[in-house]
Image (spheres, rainbow, N blue to C red):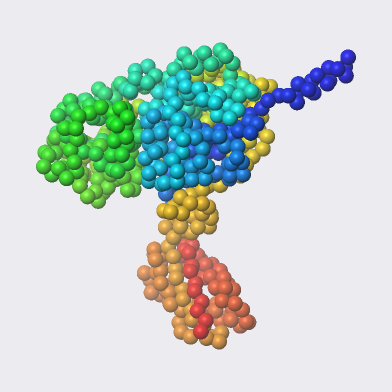
Amino acid sequence: MKKSTKNTKSKSAHSLKSVKIIPIGGLDAIGRNMTVFECEDTILVVDCGIMFPTPEMPGIDFIIPDFSYLEKNREKIKGLVITHGHEDHIGAVPFFLKKFMVPVYGSQLTLGFIKKRLEERPVGKEPEFHVIDGGDKNTIGCFEVESIPVNHSIVGGMGLAIRSKAGTIVHSGDFKIDHTPEDGRRTDIARFAEIGKEGVLLLMSDSTNAERPGYTGTEKVLNNKLFEIFASAKARIIVATFASNISRIQQILNAAQKYNRKVIISGLTMQKNIEIARSLGFLNFSDSLIAELREVNTIPLKKQTIICTGTQGEPMSALTRISNGTHKHFKSCTGDTVIITASVIPGNERDIGVVINSLLKQDTIVHYEKSKDIHVSGHASQEELKLMMGLVKPKFFLPIHGEHKHLKAHAALALDMEIKSSGIIVAENGDILEMNHRSFTKTGHLPIRNVYTEGNYIGDISGDTIKDRQTISSDGIIYISVVLAENLLVHKPVIKTRGFSPAVDPRFIQRLQEETEYRLDKVLAKPTSADNISLNVRRSLKNMIYKQTRSNPIIDLTVIEI
């Protein structure tokens, strides 16, 4: 009897179906979202976004997900599903498709944005595109993927129900629960509840606002605020928003129409997104509302509304250039009204603060995040997050989309909702998670690299390179050239500097020359290579310079042997 029981248990355990879940990005910051789902011979990829660099990454354009694991398992990849069209979810799709030509699934607007990016970064032949929206079900390898409408700060957001033999995973996408959204697209809480009744093993849910109590406000409040500002503005109105926030752009166009203002669109991405959204029926406005840039000087300032990018203080954005006087077509004037209708992404506070201060110094009226009702978040706050858990009733929980503090806060909410602590994992990018109907565990970890893009270069950039750039920006660089003939110095070392403050003192440069000569004499006492000469002299000079200046500039020493 005992033997039979043991065999039964062994057989049952062996037959358990499991799903492997690997977050490649999105769990260390707001950006670079990508998750791999794997079962049997299928890999399903959800989202493929970029992350913008921090100030500590000078010269970097953006960071894309690390595709190393996928390259080793490329024959298993059956599809890429995109939850919505924000850059942190679609920005790396061209790089992905360059390596893996697989079908792409997304809403109509999301695919419209992706196709435009593929025109800018061609990948060869066009992939299969599948438009999906609320209620659509698609079989992708061993997975069935159902899309569920959600409300977010972009048209066409969706959550996903990912079904497999192991059980159902619900991926919330980026969402909030707004009963009066501007675009009419409500989060389908009824469908989430129905799927919850069917049985859900794992909920993966948006953590961006997990520290924020209560509920996220409705977009409707912004209409009244915009009308109030437009009614009182005496001169030009400049509105900065995300180029992908189509509902917000519609609100601005409606306000301009109501107050008889012409709209000028500044920024190539903004223009392209507006064209795409209008062609697909997601924006509605008359041709007469829009003015061309070349017409700006013919329109009175009090009749102008400019829609532009720059909500995060990006150096080359239209708003930043307007604020510092380098924009080709616009300069900030006394009495202008600037509306920055977006939250500041963590890490961008300093950049946008510089822009706001610059505008205020020019006697411009600025409405920004601190102003009441000027922006409404697209992410669910604590009560909505708890409602999602209550609807879905998952056995296991994985917080996604956020910094570690957001993930931890979301995990605490899950405990409040009586999800067992043993079924909650606060993961890191690269963690290998495995789930079956009995357990949800971390079984390993993949090393995840930062893959940088810089101009046309894509790949690793060594930590030393980033560190050198930081050093040059803070302490400068010293160039030293020495010419040797038969192991003797031909003439005094030639020293030039860039960004190194002590160089203004000629006495310091003289001391540096003397120290260089002294160190060369010691190194050249024995036969050695040019590389060894450079290494030893630089090491000595570095110590001398730090003792005298408390600075650590880069020292570039060139040895020329004749």
Compared across the picture, whether 166 is left or right of 386 comes to right
In the image shown, does 100 or 244 lie closer to the viewer?
100
Residue at 13% in and 44% down: 297
Measuring from the top left, give residue 423's x and y in whole percent: 63, 24
Decide if residue 266 is on the left or right side of residue 93. left
Whether residue 158 is visible, yes or no, is yes
Q: Position of residue 164 (x, y in %)?
A: 61, 24
The answer to whether residue 229 of the structure is visible from this angle is: no
Which residue does the image show at 44% across and 26% down from the upper left? Answer: 132
Q: 476 or 190, which is in the foreground?
A: 190
Q: Residue at x 58, y 19 (%)?
A: 200
Relative to 266, 511 lies left or right: right
Q: Nearer the viewer, residue 473 or 196?
A: 196
Residue at 60% x, 33% y is 42
Decide: is 40 above or below 293. above
Horizontal and vertical percent position of residue 168: 58, 22
Question: Measured along the vertical axis of the image, is residue 328 above or below residue 89?
Answer: below
Asked where in the image residue 75 lies, by quadrant, the reply is top right
